[in-house]
Amino acid sequence: MDDTAPSRLITGIGELTTQDPELGTSHAAALVIEGDRIAWIGPASSAPAADASLDVHGRAVLPGWVDSHTHLVFAGDRSAEFAERMAGRPYAAGGIMTTVAATRAASEAELRAGARRLRAEAAAGGTTTIEAKTGYGLDVETEARLARVGAEVADVVTFLGAHLVPPGLDRREYLDLVTGPMLAAVAPHVHFVDVFCEAGAFDVDESREVLLAGRAAGLALTVHGNQLGESGGVRLAVELGAASVDHVNHLSAADVDALAGSGTVATILPGADLSTREALAPARLLADAGVALAIASNCNPGTSYTTSMQFCVATAVLQHRLSLEEALAAATTGGARALGLDRGPDAVGTLRVGGPADLQLLDAPSVAHIPYRPGVPLTIATWRRGVLERSPRLAPPLE
Ligand SMILES: [Zn+2]
């Protein structure tokens, strides 16, 4: 198909998952892309003419993933630390400094190249909206560099200067830096402020201070909370009306109640749960309590070095015991909500007429194959804002 044609018809869709409450899931479907938007959705038998067309022969189409939590901009790798952890050493927050040292030493061009490579890898796996955090600089100059690069490669950028107090620095002085000059330096490039509210990182009062400073600078709030213990991060996120609290491995009954009555999304990070061998986030419990969920990759070199949202969705079904429908929603509309991108004409995470043409094509007849075929890269084409990011090499029609 000529993907530069003004209108492009994708037809022969065996199963079309829209995540739109009215359109639901349909079969023998088609859709038309015009520019960066979806112009038409309906039965393949009544599809309108278009300037170019692609018959996908019974394959499944669904919205592109909305990956609402990554640490995409960094240098170096931590495979040695990972191997040690797999040999039995427990995860602690301090390994971040290994990446900080490598990131500070890298040029902006090196950081940009690395982030672009991961962004392309994510797109090939079906991700069409991605967030990226700072937090591997922890000084004003490097955090500003990470924010600039993040704004180039990601759709949403989050300031995570409060990732860790660098060893040797006074806590009070570092907090003043994060909430003062560092925040001012990154603010033009970022949308959210985040804090690692955890033993070994920042306590609840320090985290509140960071978040309120970000809010005063016009940023929305998100929290890394309750990953290694009941850190109070969940309750703080709810108290301040944060868009999302992420990790949520260790929750009290009161934490679950607080989330259930709130507008705060609980984001589970299956890649991190596996790569740290931490207790799995209680996603089933949260879903049953009516908590809004997102699933994200948490792509980072320490604890979840994957861009594969398909892997995270499959894991959420196979290990966290979400239903496929719950996991798909969490990885699309849930991520959109966590990023504040769930409203208005540009809302992401659903396929609907007039909405962004952010979609992926699976080399499978249905989304059921995502958890059914774990580890198999099923996405063979991704359109982001109508642009084909990966060319489909279509095999013969699916039976
Ligand atoms: Zn993270």
Image (cartoon, rainbow, N blue to C red):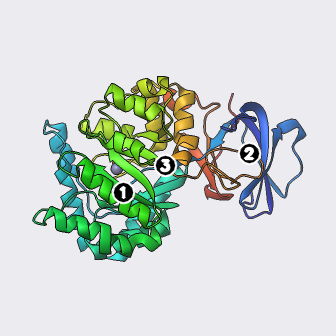
Residue placed under numbered mark 1 in the picture: 211
x and y, in percent, of residue 168 in the image? 9, 65
**Residues marked 3 and 2 touching at CB (< 8 Å):** no
x and y, in percent, of residue 73 in the image? 37, 63
**Residues marked 1 and 2 touching at CB (< 8 Å):** no
Question: In the rendered structure, which amino acid carries the disc numbered 2?
Answer: Arg
| Disc 2, SS | loop
Regarding residue 110, the answer to whether it shows in the image is no
Residue placed under numbered mark 3 in the picture: 67
Question: In the rendered structure, which amino acid carries the disc numbered 3?
Answer: Asp
Q: Which mark is residue 12?
A: none
> Does any atom of ligand 1 lie closer than 8 Å to the CB of label 1?
no
Q: Quadrant of the N terminus?
A: bottom right
Question: In the rendered structure, which amino acid carries the disc numbered 1?
Answer: Leu
Alpha carbon separation for disc pair 3 and 2: 20 Å
Q: Nearer the viewer, residue 153 or 148?
A: 148
| Disc 3, SS | strand
Q: Which mark is residue 352?
A: 2
Q: Nearer the viewer, residue 157 or 36?
A: 157
In the image, what residue occupies the spot 23% across and 52% down? 202
Q: How many C-alpha atoms fall within 10 Å of the one at disc 3: few (<14), some, or many (≥20)?
A: many
Mark 3 / mark 2, whichever is N-terminal: 3
In the image, what residue occupies the spot 37% across and 49% down? 223
